[in-house]
Image: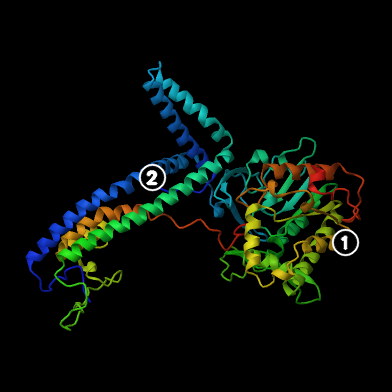
Amino acid sequence: MIDLPKPTKPALRSFWLVLSAGAGLAVGLAAWGLQAPYPAIWGLLAAAGASVPGLLRPALVKRPYEAWDRLSRIARRAARLWLTGVAFLILTIVGRLGARVAWNAPETGASGWTPKRPLPAGSHRTTSEVASAPGFGGGWVRTLAGWAGHSGNVWAWSLIPVLALLKVVEGKPTRSLGGNVYTLY
Amino acid sequence: MSTLYTEPGATGSNGSNVVRAILGFLAGALGLVLVIPAALLLLPFWFVGTLVEGLRRLLAPKPLPWHELIEFHPRMGWKPRPDASAHALDYGGDTYQFTTDADGWRGRETLEQSDVVVFGDSHAFGCGVDDRHFFADLLDDVRIKAIGSPAYSMVQPVLWMERLAPHLRGKLVIWLVCLGNDLDDSVHPGLHEYRAPFVRRSHESEGWEIATDHVDPSRWTITSREGSLDSLIEICSSGYASERAFAAADYLIGRAHDACESAGARLVVMTIPELSPVARRYLRRTLAASAAADKFDEGLPDRMFGQICDRLGVRFVTLNDHLESADYLENDFHWNPRGHRRVAELIGQLHRDTSWDAGATVAEDPLNVPAEVSG
């Protein structure tokens, strides 16, 4: 959950509470660093004071909420670009240095087609060998890990952490205006 | 064609697989180091996002789904559920709290005790605001009863006026008509999967009639209703859809007028413009893609309603003269608390104003003054 939920009143209030708690923590830590008496009390007072406007008038929180949401989208896009690069780097290292088949077209003029065997019934979700690997259908991590072990491509396990993080940054579909505006009005 | 992975059964030594596995793990280790900056960048956003979503789930009241908000009615299609006290979702995803009486209508007053009875659709129901902001409960000196339901067209209010006519004697009847969808919905026999009474040209005479024969609890499977602003644009442009919608409205206002006149009640038709920010965004977008954009005349419905009411001797008030965009919810099509307050004050003004008679026209109506003047 990287993007913020729709800016409804409960979401705006929640966001402000989280920011207020952060502000309280910062004040408490500063008070502790300055060796002030009762730093926790200072932190609590700061958090409580900061939370009041947002709780009473959630509309006031909308601008900072949207600014944070925009920032999170920018960060997500940047992270996605970076992680895709890392995934391709791993593929390049394994492919260039470890593949037994050349990446370019065969120089001898031999066919580059790889043989495919008939797939088992019920493998309609994919037409690759992944469908016959153990763990298929039990989530993408199990499927990929099962296929990699089964097919001798153990190197592919190294992709799993990168792909997992990529999945986190995939994000939700953009909030757009629907077609049927007068659904129930 | 080359491939990065080893096909099971394909020729290949175990040695090359081992080399690739070692390279894979080394590359994976490098990859893990390289993902750290991305993870650090995302961490605060993930932390805040997760906390906000968790708190939101705790703070947000659980809304009642639409089908639990209403119950089947053999003539009207549906009506609000009686004795409900719950939360419902508005278009923007926010919840609002509402309470209904033993008949399913919102508001503190009873029909018998009320001075003013307001008929209409979701605006009359008060969609989008809590009970404490509902227009019918805001005035101390004028008792208002609202008879309205989400998704009603112009047809159900007329049928309710006729049904409740014996209780309307001596009262002021206000009929809220939402220009955005009520005109179009009135000529459709269903709203999504719900069967609804509608108005059509009579098979037996030259005029119009309200059809209710098809209304039963079974699912309506022919969806002809667009539910978008395309219909409003068509109605606001000259053409068949426009003529049909206003002819149907003419018939319905006539029936409402007859019902109120025979009951001894004074009728006011009050049109609701589409001024909410979300509606204006939709309208701009739909107009940009519409072939009828050059003929679009947003003032047409009010002028037509004014003419119809003038001819029938019904008082007409357009809320276009009393409300502005700031009176509407930001992410919904309905009024916000400020809008409800303004509408309540206007209703109070209409109730207290004994100077007008049923023949007052739009032009001579003292209440038809711009919003900034009326305050």
Q: Earlier in the sequence, mark 2 or mark 1?
A: 2
Q: Which chain carries label 2?
A: B
Disc 2 marks which amino acid?
A: Trp
Q: Which residue lies furthest to the bottom in this view?
A: A109
Circle 1 sits on which residue? Answer: B312
Crowdedness near tag 1: few (<14), some (14–19) or many (≥20) residues, C-alpha within 10 Å: some
User: Which one is nearer the viewer's eye here, A36 or B153?
Assistant: A36
Disc 1 marks which amino acid?
A: Leu
B206 up-or-down from B328: above or below:
below
Q: Quadrant of residue A151?
A: bottom left
Mark 2 touches mark 1? (CB < 8 Å)? no
Q: In the rendered structure, find residue B270 and report the number of the disc placed on it.
A: none
Pick the quarter of the image with the C terminus of chain B: top right
Q: Mark 1 lies on which chain?
A: B
- The structure residue drawn at horizontal position 70% and vertical position 56%, both measured from the top left corner, is B274
B36 up-or-down from B141: above or below:
below
- The structure residue drawn at horizontal position 45% and vertical position 36%, both measured from the top left corner, is A18
User: Which one is nearer the viewer's eye here, B52 or B25?
Assistant: B25
Crowdedness near tag 2: few (<14), some (14–19) or many (≥20) residues, C-alpha within 10 Å: many
On the question of residue B62 being in view, the answer is no
Mark nearest the camera among 2 and 1 is 2
User: Which one is nearer the viewer's eye here, A160 or B110?
Assistant: A160
Tell whether B179 sits left or right of B72. Answer: right
Q: Where is residue B80 in the image (x, y as percent from the top left)?
A: 63, 51
Q: Where is residue B246 in the image (x, y as percent from the top left)?
A: 78, 67
User: Which one is nearer the viewer's eye here, A168 or B273?
Assistant: A168
Circle 2 sits on which residue? Answer: B46
Q: Which residue lies furthest to the front in this view?
A: A107
Q: Where is residue B257 in the image (x, y as percent from the top left)?
A: 84, 58
Quote the CA–CA distance across marks 2 and 1.
63 Å
Q: Where is residue A179 in the image (x, y as percent from the top left)?
A: 57, 63
Pick the quarter of the image with the N terminus of chain B: bottom left
